[in-house]
C-alpha cells in the first residue's frame, strides 16, 4: 500500500480476541502496534469471557473499537462458533483490514481466523504451533489451533519446538518465525507496574498475613476435559495437601458453573484453603509470586510461573507446551489424586527436587516477543 507521496501507507491491523488469556498475551502486542507509525491498530473483542476479559482491558488501558458480547449462559460450542463467525465477519467487512491477528486456540481465535480467510484477508497467528497430539486433550483447543494453522499466512511460534510442529505439518518454512511468547512480555510489564503502583495487587495482603509461614500452593482449574471425575479427583488431592499444617492453598475459582459446583461443595470450610473470586491480572501475577508451587490445568500458567521461578504441576494427561516438561520447569501429573499429592509433597519435602524445577531455564521467552512480531508484520 503506497500513498500519493510515495511513502508506504500504514497497514491496518485488526486484532481479534475474546478471553482473558488472549487479552493478557495480546495487550503487549497491541501497545507495540499503537506506538508504531507503520500501523493503524484496531481491536475487536468477542466477549467470550466477559468480566475476566474486561479486567485485563482496564489494567492494560485498551478500549476495543468493536465489542460483540457474544457469550450467553449455557451456550453450546456450535452456537458460540456461529455467533462469532457472523459477528466477526461483519466487523471485518466494516474495517477492511490488511491483516487480522488472532492468538492461541480459543473459539474466538478459530472463528476470527476463519472469517478472515473467507474474505482472503491474511491471518497472523500468535502462539502458533502448539500441539498436544490428541484432539480431545485439550478439547476443543487442539483442533482450534490446528484449524488456524492450516490457513494462517504468518505463524509466530513461541519456541523452536512449536515451529518444528508446524514444519512437520508442511507449513511453508518462510512463514514460520520463532518469537518467544508474548505472555512473558505481559508478565514483565505487569510486574514492573506493580513495583511502581503496589496498590494494584494489594488485595491478597490479608491472605498473605493469614498464611504467613506456610508453603502456599497457588491453584487454577477449569479445563473442559477435567469436568466431572477429573475435578472430583483434583478436589480430593487438594484436601489431602491442605491437611498438612505447613501448607495453604489459594484457589481463584473459575466462573464456569461446572467448576464452581464441585469446588464449592468439596473445598469450602477448610482452614488452609482459600476459595476466592477470579483475580485480575496484577493480583494473579502476585499469586504466582507468593506461591511456592503452582498446581494448574491451565496452559498460560505453564509459561508464566517459570518466569518467576515457580515449579508447575500440570493436572492434565497431555500438554501442548512440552518445552516446560523437557526443561524441567513443569511436570505432568494428570488428575489422579494419589499422583498429584505425591508429586506436590516431593517438592514440599525435598529442597533438591524443588530447586531443580525452580532454577530450570524458562524456555518460553525473554520479554521481546511483541517487538519481534511487529517487525515481522512490517516486512
Image (cartoon, rainbow, N blue to C red):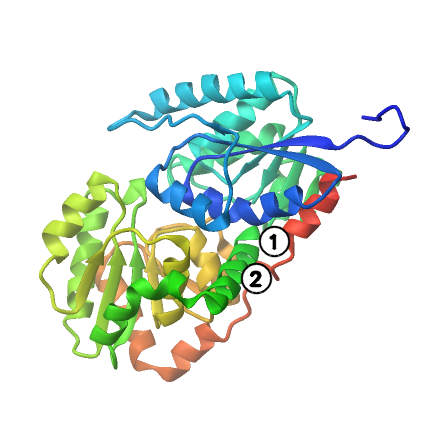
**Label 1 element class:** loop
**Label 2 element class:** loop
Label 1–label 2 contact, CB within 8 A = yes
Residue placed furthest toward the right: 6
Q: Nearer the viewer, residue 368 or 113?
A: 368
Tell me if mark 1 has few (under 14), some (14-19) or many (20+) residues whose alpha carbon lies within 10 angstroms of its own: many
For the question of whether residue 148 can be seen, the reply is yes
Relative to 294, say whether 234 is above or below: above
The image position of residue 14, as x and y in percent, is 60, 31
- Tell me if 39 is positioned left or right of 5 in this view: left
Q: Quadrant of residue 237?
A: bottom left
For the image, the number of numbered tags is 2
**Residue 159 image label:** 1
Quadrant where the C terminus sits is top right
The image position of residue 331, as x and y in percent, is 40, 63
Residue at image x 34%, y 75%? 347
**Residue 334 image label:** none
Task: Report how far apart the C-alphas of labels 1 and 2 lie in the structure.
Answer: 7 Å
Residue at image x 38%, y 27%? 69
Relative to 52, say whether 76 is above or below: above
- Mark 1 or mark 2, which has the lower sequence index? 1
The image position of residue 106, as x and y in percent, is 44, 36
- Tell me if 19 is positioned left or right of 129 in this view: left
Q: Nearer the viewer, residue 103 or 347?
A: 103
Residue named by callout 2? 363
Residue at image x 74%, y 41%? 37
Q: Nearer the viewer, residue 279 or 379?
A: 279
Quadrant where the N terminus sits is top right
Amino acid at each position: 500500500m503506497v500513498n500519493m507521496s510515495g511513502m508506504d501507507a500504514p497497514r491496518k491491523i485488526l486484532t481479534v480476541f475474546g478471553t482473558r488469556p488472549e487479552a493478557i498475551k495480546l495487550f503487549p502486542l497491541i501497545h507495540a502496534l499503537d506506538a508504531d507509525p507503520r500501523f493503524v491498530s484496531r481491536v475487536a473483542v468477542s466477549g467470550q469471557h466477559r468480566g475476566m476479559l474486561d479486567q485485563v482491558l482496564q489494567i492494560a488501558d485498551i478500549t476495543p473499537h468493536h465489542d460483540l458480547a457474544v457469550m450467553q449462559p449455557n451456550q453450546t460450542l456450535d452456537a458460540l462458533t456461529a455467533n462469532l463467525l457472523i459477528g466477526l465477519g461483519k466487523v471485518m467487512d466494516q474495517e477492511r483490514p490488511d491483516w487480522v491477528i488472532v492468538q492461541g486456540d480459543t473459539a474466538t481465535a478459530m472463528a476470527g481466523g476463519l472469517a478472515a480467510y473467507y474474505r482472503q484477508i491474511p491471518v497472523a497467528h500468535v502462539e502458533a504451533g502448539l500441539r498436544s497430539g490428541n484432539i480431545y486433550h485439550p478439547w476443543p483447543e487442539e483442533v482450534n489451533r490446528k484449524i488456524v494453522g492450516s490457513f494462517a499466512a504468518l505463524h509466530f511460534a513461541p519456541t523452536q519446538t512449536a515451529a518444528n510442529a508446524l514444519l512437520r505439518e508442511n507449513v511453508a518454512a518462510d512463514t514460520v518465525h520463532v518469537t518467544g511468547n508474548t505472555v512473558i512480555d505481559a508478565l514483565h510489564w505487569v510486574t514492573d507496574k506493580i513495583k511502581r503502583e503496589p496498590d494494584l495487587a494489594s488485595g491478597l495482603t490479608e491472605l498473605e498475613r493469614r498464611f504467613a509461614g506456610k508453603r502456599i500452593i497457588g491453584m487454577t482449574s477449569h479445563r473442559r476435559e477435567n469436568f466431572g471425575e477429573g475435578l472430583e479427583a483434583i478436589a480430593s488431592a487438594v484436601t489431602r495437601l491442605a491437611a498438612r499444617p505447613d501448607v495453604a492453598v489459594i484457589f481463584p475459582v473459575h466462573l464456569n458453573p461446572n467448576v464452581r459446583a464441585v469446588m464449592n461443595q468439596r473445598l469450602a470450610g477448610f482452614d488452609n484453603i482459600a476459595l476466592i473470586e477470579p483475580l485480575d491480572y496484577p493480583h494473579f501475577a502476585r499469586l504466582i509470586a507468593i506461591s511456592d508451587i503452582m498446581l494448574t490445568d491451565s496452559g498460560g500458567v505453564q509459561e508464566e510461573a517459570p518466569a518467576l521461578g515457580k515449579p508447575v504441576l500440570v493436572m492434565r494427561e497431555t500438554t501442548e507446551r512440552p518445552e516446560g516438561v523437557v526443561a524441567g520447569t513443569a511436570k505432568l501429573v494428570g488428575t489422579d489424586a494419589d499422583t498429584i499429592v505425591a508429586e506436590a509433597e516431593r517438592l514440599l519435602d525435598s529442597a533438591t527436587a524443588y530447586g531443580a524445577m525452580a532454577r530450570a531455564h524458562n524456555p518460553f521467552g525473554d520479554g521481546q516477543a511483541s517487538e519481534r512480531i511487529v517487525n515481522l508484520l512490517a516486512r
